[in-house]
Image (tube, coloured by chain):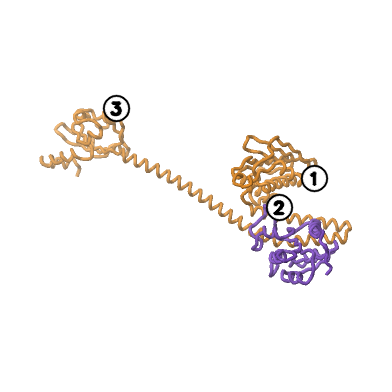
Chain colours: A orange, B purple
């Protein structure tokens, strides 16, 4: 049974009780006539809209809504009165009401047709949902933040998981490398000794050629073991105040013999005043030797050239650039060259640049490779000149 | 000049003995640590070439025993595990500290070693040692 039918059946005393109920209801009740004039309000309506009862009575109901909704409202009211069915106003939308002080409040409104002596009127029951909407908004925002946090944590977890996997792989490689090193170095040593003795006892030329090959391969094998071990045992740099140019020169001297055999010329262009940096000399040496080895291996034509530049873009960083005129790196391989075990060479562990990358990053530096296939490769090692870690060393 | 070579790799002993003998050294070869100490008690040597990984008494044990004696002999240690390389350093060598070995040994060579470098080390270590022809 609808509300207005109940009202019709009520006795005058029951109606008086109902009037009380309406007056003290926590819901604002506003009754308007067909012209939209306010006929009746209850106590809470005064609080909700900030008008006194005297101000409200006789006021056009459109004054209680924002400007943009006013023009259309009389038509909506006529529509309702032509089909007087109790129903919520606004069909699921949040409605906005206007207070005396100009503030907008969010409301939900239920409409009930009421037969009165002045004809058919509309009773609007208005609930302020501003706070609820605010809480909902907060909850939505908190949910969003929570979702973001969960997302970030999940990503961190995945990253940690990946790192753990990487470290466990490194630990496996370490154990394997140590075993392989010990077990292989002994036979390599004996092969080398046997070759030495053969050469000593029979020094004819043909035998010598093969023995030289045996010796060469012994050292290549040993180098592979060293690479594997140094990748597996990379550790925090032991910082010292070191002369970068001296280290670079030492590496060039070491590589000179191999470069010389290929007729490769090394050109040096060192900028002034960039001699000293804070670094682990052994690790930086390893990086430079690896890059020089790669440059040498990449050059297959006569008149090859490697240019070494030491320069600085700012007062914080020194850049060591190795530019070779070698075969270059295929574009699709460029982003893989730092991956451990990636190699396009028929010989090699694929660990050289992976080691360089790890060591340079441990120094808080950057390593960058650009290459043009068929023309050459440029490797830039950017290292911080000063390290915060050096102050921890008692010798400095 | 007498050398005691202690290494469990028989082929290494054969080849290294030949290298040393060709340079005029007299070489005794044993394949384990206990045997090595036994030889040291009964014979006079000027230098010991010692492998670290040995069956039974380890090379470290032999080294410690030799260096604690009243007249310690010169010892050149041969190591299968890389020693003295800051990049390749690990925490223990056969359960003993690498640093202690490096401290006690007169020279350390990582296998495989360059023969000429090995001979240079041997000659440096035995230089000035007067042979006791007992």
Identify the residue at image location x=19%, y=41%: A3
Position of A318 compared to A258: left or right? left
Dot placed on the residue nearer the N-terminal end, 2 or 1: 1
Q: Is residue A357 visible?
A: no
The residue that disc 2 covers is A348
Viewport quadrant of the C terminus of chain A: top right
A199 in relation to A365, above or below? below
A127 in relation to B123, above or below? above
Mark 1 belongs to chain = A
Q: Residue furthest right?
A: A204
The residue that disc 1 covers is A262
Mark 3 belongs to chain = A
Mark 2 belongs to chain = A
Identify the residue at image location x=73%, y=47%: A293
A52 in relation to B6, above or below? above
Based on the displayed image, in which of its 4 quarters is residue B97 positioned? bottom right
Q: CA distance from mark 3 to mark 1?
A: 92 Å
Q: Dot 1: within a 10 Å radius of its alpha carbon, few (fewer than 14), some, or many (20 or more) residues?
A: some
Q: Secondary structure at mark 3?
A: loop
């Amino acid at each position: 049974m609808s509300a207005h039918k109940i009202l019709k059946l009520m006795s005058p005393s029951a109606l008086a009780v109902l009037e009380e109920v309406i007056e003290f209801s926590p819901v604002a009740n506003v009754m308007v006539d067909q012209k939209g004039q306010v006929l009746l309000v209850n106590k809470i309506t005064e609080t909700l809209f900030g008008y006194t009862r005297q101000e409200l009575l006789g006021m056009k109901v459109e004054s209680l809504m924002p400007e943009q909704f006013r023009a259309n409202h009389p038509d909506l009211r006529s529509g309702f009165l032509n089909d007087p069915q109790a129903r919520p106003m606004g069909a699921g939308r949040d409605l906005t009401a206007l207070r005396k002080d100009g503030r907008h409040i969010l409301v939900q409104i239920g409409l009930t047709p009421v037969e009165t002596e002045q004809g058919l009127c509309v009773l609007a029951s208005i609930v302020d949902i501003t706070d609820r909407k605010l809480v909902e908004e907060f909850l939505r925002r908190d949910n969003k933040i929570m979702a973001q946090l969960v997302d970030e944590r999940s990503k961190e977890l995945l990253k940690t998981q990946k790192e753990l996997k990487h470290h466990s792989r490194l630990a496996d490689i370490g154990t394997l490398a140590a075993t392989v090193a010990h077990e292989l170095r002994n036979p390599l040593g004996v092969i080398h000794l046997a070759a030495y003795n053969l050469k000593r006892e029979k020094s004819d030329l043909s035998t010598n050629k093969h023995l030289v090959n045996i010796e060469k391969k012994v050292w290549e094998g040993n180098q592979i073991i060293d690479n594997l071990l140094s990748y597996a045992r990379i550790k925090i740099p032991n910082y010292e105040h070191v002369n970068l140019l001296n280290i670079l020169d030492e590496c060039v001297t070491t590589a000179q013999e191999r470069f010389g055999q290929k007729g490769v010329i090394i050109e040096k262009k060192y900028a002034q005043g960039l001699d000293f940096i804070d670094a682990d000399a052994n690790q930086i040496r390893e990086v430079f030797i690896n890059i020089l080895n790669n440059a040498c291996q990449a050059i297959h034509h006569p008149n090859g050239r490697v240019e070494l530049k030491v320069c600085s873009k700012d007062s914080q960083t020194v850049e060591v650039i190795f530019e070779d005129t070698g075969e270059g790196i295929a574009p699709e391989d460029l982003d893989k060259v730092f991956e451990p075990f990636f190699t396009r060479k028929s010989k090699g562990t694929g660990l050289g640049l992976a080691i360089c990358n790890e060591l340079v990053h441990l120094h808080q530096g950057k390593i960058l490779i650009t290459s043009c296939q068929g023309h050459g490769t440029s490797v830039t090692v950017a290292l911080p000149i000063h390290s915060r870690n050096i102050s921890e060393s008692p010798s400095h | 000049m007498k050398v005691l070579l202690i290494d469990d790799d028989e082929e290494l002993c054969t080849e290294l003995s030949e290298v040393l003998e060709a340079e005029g050294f007299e070489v005794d070869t044993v394949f384990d640590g206990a045997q090595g100490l036994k030889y040291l008690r009964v014979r006079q040597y000027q230098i010991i070439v010692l492998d670290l990984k040995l069956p039974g008494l380890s090379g470290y044990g032999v080294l410690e025993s030799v260096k604690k004696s009243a007249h310690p002999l010169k010892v050149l240690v041969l190591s299968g595990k890389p020693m003295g390389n800051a990049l390749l350093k690990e925490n223990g060598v056969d359960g003993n500290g690498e640093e202690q070995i490096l401290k006690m040994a007169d020279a350390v060579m990582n296998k495989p070693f360059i023969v000429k470098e090995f001979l240079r080390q041997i000659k440096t270590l035995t230089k000035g040692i007067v042979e006791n022809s007992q």
